Amino acid sequence: MAFSTRASGTDIAPGSPPLADAGSVEAATIGVETARSSSSLWRDAWRRLLRNRLAMAGGIVVVLLALVAIFADVLMPQAYTKTNFGRLNEAPSRDYPLGTDALGRDLLSRMIYGARVSMLVGLGAQFFVVAIGVPVGALSGYLGGRADLVITRFIDVMYAFPRLLFVILVMSMLGAGLFNIFLAIGLTGWVGIARQTRAQVMALKEKEYVDAARGLGAGFVRLLGRHILPNALTPIVVAVTFGIPEAIFTEAALSFIGVGINPPTPSWGQMVGEGQQFIRSYWHLCVFPAIAIAITMLAFTFFGDGVRDALDPKMK
Amino acid sequence: MVQYIVSRLLWLVPTLLAMALVTFLVMHATPGSPLDPVAEGANPLSPDAQKALAAHYGLDKPLWHQFAIFVSKAVRGDFGFSFVYKTRTVAEILRETFPISLLLGSMALVLAVAGGLTLGILAAVYQNRGWDYISVLLATVGVAVPNFVLAVFLIILFSFVIPLFPTGGWNSPRDWVLPTITLALAPMGIIARFTRASMLEVIRADYTLTARAKGLSEGPVIFKHTLKNALIPVVTLLGPLFAAVGTGSFFVESIFRVPGMGRFFVLSMSGRDYPMIMAVVLTYGVFLAIMNLVVDLTYGVLDPRIRY
């Protein structure tokens, strides 16, 4: 995340239209001198993030998890589907560092592949959340009037739903599977980001620089895409950093009650759900995946807190 | 005030109708039907039997008609017979399971509020010192880690390592301890975080300085002057917290084998128990909406500046 923001900060050349760059909203809203470099918002944020030790620790764990997810095929000691019916539910040993499950499958391999599932869900679900939430929020805020009223009423009704309940309902409609989890989280999770985008767009569309761009003949798409949305990015970025662990949590919860990932694909939530029934006899079945979920969630939360504090120092 | 309450209650009607409609449509779009045989992989029922069953449950009518019948009955508290527990009505099952969930939820909420406020106040008073770090850490763990994961750790710790509490069941008050703690940790963390932030703001306010300047000792300053004002943003949270406790109880109830509504919801999901699913979703909806209303009314008590 941080790398991409830095890139977007530096590739705004000094020659680009001064009314459209990222610095102008900062200058307009906070009232600092406009002579400052246009990338200062993102660069300052990056510097603040680097100084935050807890956030960096979280970030490092996240990077490690991402590496495990990417190289899962190489890292797994054996295939996560390989069964050994001679050695069922074994406690950790030299052959099986984390033990075996009820079908004699290597728990470590299943955990490593589970990292990939979690990461995929975190990113894939956020893709849908952003793809639905940002356009809906932007349209609602930009158009105003009756369209806005209808959309906000709809959002209010969606808010009244207990979130997890709704995801479970949608999952049972779509059926288990990785892609359906993306879709279910996207369909239920877009409301928060839509609200925030709407608020930002409503504030920004009244700014003089937007008027100027409109006066110069910029069309609807260009106004929203080039002038308004880039400046509304901060709360969206924060919402996404918190949305990723939330999606991971949701997948774990769905798989825990058995409507998430299809077996034999391993998922940490599903492993905890199946393992906790035998916690007295085979503690290792649920404890290791539980630890993995806990570490992942904490790492993302610390990192997300850091990103929020870095992007919006006032909120601390 | 009365007008405000009435208008809020009237708003409940379209909201609940919309919730019922969405749930109804989603359910009927779901593959699989209660007319399928109960055993997995069994031969399909004969067309005649299916027709008889559909007529019995009213599934042969057009969808809009089914929905209208459902709404007119639900208003009178009649949700029909459960498809899975065929001899019992949904209302009966809910009457049995909802009080258990309510008891568990209320205990968890009381613990969450008491614990969260304590942690938050401690953290704010001792900002950037030991207590602060401990309570922020606890709060973060509570918020970030899913409750079914916390449950595993708590069972290992307090049932196996130190055998204090049973791993599940719902017979004696001793069984209540672990589920309540598990369910309370997430809302407790949220409350602690908000209390800390809002206390820190109030502690720096001018009137707190005045209170100190006129020679009050630390106790009255914190409890009489800062706490009450710091509580207002915290009360806002209670609405979402009820939701968190409500849905959180699915997992806690299934891990600790608590015979509550959340556990029934999960079971009815896989059984395509349409009447049961509708009833549970709507019960949660009504409960949350009323709680949100209560919360909104509480603001007025805490902050006389707020008018309705």
Image: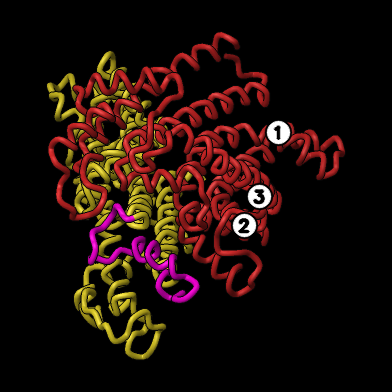
Residue drawn at x 46%, y 32% as measured from the top left: B91
Amino acid type of disc 2? Asp
Residue A122 drawn at (x, y percent): 29, 54
**Alpha carbon of mark 1 to alpha carbon of mark 3: how far?**
17 Å
Which numbered disc, 2 or 3, marks the residue closer to the eye? 2
Q: Residue flagged by tag 3: what amino acid is it?
A: Gly
Q: Residue B64 in the image: x percent, y percent?
A: 23, 20
Circle 1 chain: B
Whether residues under marks 1 and 3 lie with C-beta atoms below 8 angstroms apart, the answer is no
What mark, if any, has residue B175 been given in the picture? 2
Q: Quadrant of the N terminus of chain B?
A: top right
Residue drawn at point x = 31 percent, y = 48 percent = B270
**Which x, y percent locates residue B214?**
85, 35
Camera-nearest residue between B56 and A17:
B56
Mark toward the viewer: 1 or 2: 2
Chain B on-screen colour: red
**Badge 1 local density, few (<14 within 10 Å), some, or many (20+)?**
some
Q: Residue furthest right?
A: B215
Q: Residue at x 46, y 24 (%)?
A: B77
Q: Which residue is mark 3?
A: B115
